[in-house]
Image: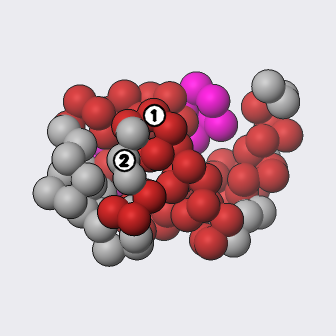
Amino acid sequence: MPVIADRVLMVGRMQKDEVFKKVTEYLIKQFEIPPEKINPEAHLFKDLGMDSIDALDWFAAMESQIDLPIIEKEIKMIRTVQDVVDYVVRNLRQNADAPG
């Protein structure tokens, strides 16, 4: 697995469609969700059958694998696949741009 800082910079520069593709791949692989069910408007819980524990596990994995910051207030607002994509893009860019 590449160095976390390299992944942060790489993912931080991704366009939303690239992040959507990665999110889709993860949902298919980790949660065995049929690809035809996954679209930006798909509701994580109602449409994709995830529960809150699944979502928390997923975000914990992203935190450790790609250094995605966990912002509890924002995570509570996530409902759709597009919400996940927007969260990842916004927070990885902020994290990649932060001095340090």
Foreground: 50 or 9? 50
Foreground: 60 or 39? 39
x and y percentages locating residue 22 in the rendered image: 61, 53
Disc 1 residue type (three-letter) = Gln
Q: Residue furthest left?
A: 46
Give me the residue at 57% from left, 41% from top.
68
Residue 2 occupies quadrant:
top right
Give me the residue at 78% from left, 41% from top.
7
- As drawn, the label of residue 30 is 1
Identify the element where label 2 is drawn: loop
Q: Mark 2 to mark 1: distance in Å?
A: 8 Å
How is this picture coloured?
secondary structure
Q: Is residue 72 above or below residue 13?
A: above
Quadrant containing the N terminus is top right
x and y percentages locating residue 10 in the rendered image: 81, 52
Residue 30 occupies quadrant:
top left
Disc 2 residue type (three-letter) = Ile
x and y percentages locating residue 76 in the rendered image: 24, 50
Q: Residues within 10 Å of mark 1 (few under 14, many from 20)?
A: few
Q: Which residue is mark 2?
A: 33
Identify the element where label 1 is drawn: helix
The residues colored magenta run 63-74
